[in-house]
């Protein structure tokens, strides 16, 4: 039985699955079931991979760069053109993670981009329901958006007490010195905690350059998986 490997096969396997095939000198294929029936252990394991879908929300004041962060993460693109989100926009992205004791796992993130204008905040809790995590976004060039972080965190955790939260101090590229250690210390030394007493991870991000964007979402996804 011969298997034709298409150019898209690489996209169908996680990095961990690819390494398993490479190490065992077995060709991976798009038809994973065929490999399963022929005793390919690498594909046999991936065939039984646990796939989870989880909802996360991006929350923050108007104009902090929520949509740009999502576009950088999902589409690998950035635009200087400002487009205000009206209501809610939902994007999807798949992550791969190996959580200790659970093997290779695939996490499909349903990313809800919530409008940041004041008039929307009264109904935003409705859209937060059922979310496993949230990225709370502030613009480092606007102090008022940083001051709003606590309110956004409280709102999300009131609706989802067991949810996982991360903070994105966005637009770091617009600072005169993006690598200013004093700035980093002053922002990151504020250790926020959720209702379970867990520290909330914070990142200095740039949707324009991609700084720490993948790291933020990957860590949030890993934390969601670890929490069950």
Image (cartoon, helix red, strand yellow):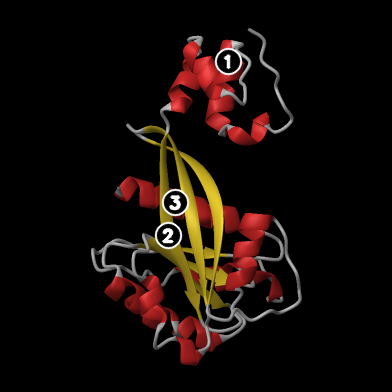
Q: Which residue is at 44% across, 55% downward?
A: 220
Locate residue 189, reporting x and y percent: 43, 69
Residue occupying the far left of the picture: 196
For the residue pair 175 and 129, the one nearer the viewer reads as 129
Q: Seen in the image, is 57 located left or right of residue 192?
A: right
Q: Is residue 183 above or below residue 216?
A: below
Q: Nearer the viewer, mark 1 or mark 2?
A: 2
For the residue pair 6 and 13, the one nearer the viewer reads as 6
Q: Is residue 94 above or below residue 67?
A: above
Q: Which residue is at 41% across, 80% downward?
A: 124
For the residue pair 16 and 192, the one nearer the viewer reads as 16
Q: CA distance from mark 1 to mark 3?
A: 27 Å
**Residue 166 visible in the shown view:** no
Q: Seen in the image, is 107 located left or right of residue 4?
A: left
Q: Are marks 1 and 3 in contact (CB under 8 Å)?
A: no
Circle 3 — which element? helix
Locate residue 52, reporting x and y percent: 40, 45
Q: Residues within 10 Å of mark 3 (few under 14, many from 20)?
A: many
Q: Earlier in the sequence, mark 2 or mark 3?
A: 2
Q: Residues within 10 Å of mark 2 (few under 14, many from 20)?
A: some
Q: Are marks 1 and 2 in contact (CB under 8 Å)?
A: no
Tell me the tag on residue 23.
Answer: 1
Q: Is residue 145 above or below residue 38?
A: below
Question: What residue is pinned by disc 2?
Answer: 55
Q: Which residue is at 69% across, 55% downward?
A: 76
Locate residue 192, reporting x and y percent: 36, 70
**Residue 176 visible in the shown view:** yes
Q: CA distance from mark 1 to mark 2?
A: 35 Å
Question: What residue is pinned by disc 3?
Answer: 221
Q: Which residue is at 44% across, 62% downward?
A: 56
């Amino acid at each position: 039985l011969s298997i034709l490997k298409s150019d898209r096969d690489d996209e169908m396997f996680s990095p961990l699955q690819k390494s398993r095939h490479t190490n065992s000198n077995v060709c991976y294929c798009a038809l994973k079931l065929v490999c399963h029936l022929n005793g390919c252990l690498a594909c046999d394991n991936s065939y039984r991979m646990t796939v989870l879908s989880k909802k996360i929300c991006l929350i923050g004041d108007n104009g902090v760069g929520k949509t740009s962060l999502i576009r950088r993460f999902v589409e690998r693109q950035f635009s200087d053109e400002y487009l205000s989100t009206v209501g809610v926009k939902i994007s999807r992205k798949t992550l791969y993670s190996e959580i200790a004791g659970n093997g290779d796992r695939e996490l499909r993130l349903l990313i809800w981009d919530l409008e940041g204008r004041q008039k929307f905040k009264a109904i935003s809790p409705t859209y937060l329901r059922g979310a496993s995590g949230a990225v709370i976004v502030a613009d480092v060039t606007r102090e008022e958006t940083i001051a709003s972080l606590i309110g956004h965190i409280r709102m999300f955790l009131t609706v989802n007490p067991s949810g996982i939260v991360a903070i994105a101090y966005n637009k770091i590229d617009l600072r005169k010195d993006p690598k200013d250690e004093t700035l980093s210390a002053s922002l990151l030394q504020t250790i926020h905690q959720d209702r379970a007493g867990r520290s909330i991870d914070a990142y200095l991000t740039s949707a324009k350059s991609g700084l720490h964007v993948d790291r933020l979402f990957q860590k949030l996804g890993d934390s969601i998986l670890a929490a069950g």
